[in-house]
Amino acid sequence: MSLTEKKSVPCQGAMPPMTEVQAKVFLAQTPAWRLENNATRITRKFECADFVGAQVFVNKVGDLAEVEGHHPDISFGWGYAHIKIYTHKIMGLHENDFILAAKIDKLLLK
């Protein structure tokens, strides 16, 4: 099953974060994203036509985050949106992070 077909599940925080090796396996399915902070975060910068385009995209990401129950850190400005995803309860990466990243990538196709 592809990441975009999966649904994020609530993380209880009692599990360890992914290792870098595990994260790289999932990263192969979301190749536009980068591992950062000792493989505890994934990030991606999106380019947009202007400020309004960035704002519209960020609002779509926010709506998706609400549906998934998994919320990224987002910053944006004129012509860009920068998204950082990790699971706050475990201070690292979980499958949910890659599910959200894949679904954000799919927003670009709409």
Image: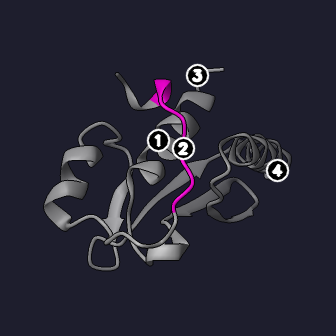
| Place of residue 94 in the rendered image (x, y in percent of width and height, measured from the top left) | 39, 58
Q: Name which residue lies at 65% across and 58% down.
A: 71
Q: Amino acid at mark 1?
A: Ile
Q: Earlier in the sequence, mark 1 or mark 2?
A: 2
Q: CA distance from mark 1 to mark 3?
A: 16 Å
Secondary structure of the residue carrying tag 4 is: helix
Tell me where residue 79 appears, x and y as whole percent. 70, 53
Q: CA distance from mark 4 to mark 1?
A: 22 Å
Tell me the residue at 51%/60% (across/down): 11
The residue pinned by badge 4 equals 55
- Whole-angstrom CA distance, mark 3 to mark 2, is 21 Å
Disc 3 residue type? Leu
Q: Earlier in the sequence, mark 3 or mark 4?
A: 4
In the foreground, 35 or 12: 12
Q: How packed is label 3: few (under 14 Cα within 10 Å), some, or many (20 or more)?
A: few
10, 55: nearer the viewer: 10
Badge 1 marks a residue whose secondary structure is: helix
* Tag nearer the camera, 2 or 4: 2
In this figure, which residue is indicated by the disc labeled 2?
Answer: 8
- Give the secondary structure at mark 3: loop
Q: Quadrant of the C terminus?
A: top right
Query: Which residue is labeled 1 in the image?
Result: 99
Left-right relation of 53 to 109: right
Mark 2 burial class by Cα count in 10 Å: few <14, some 14-19, many 20+ = some
**SS label for mark 2:** loop
| Amino acid beneath label 2 | Ser
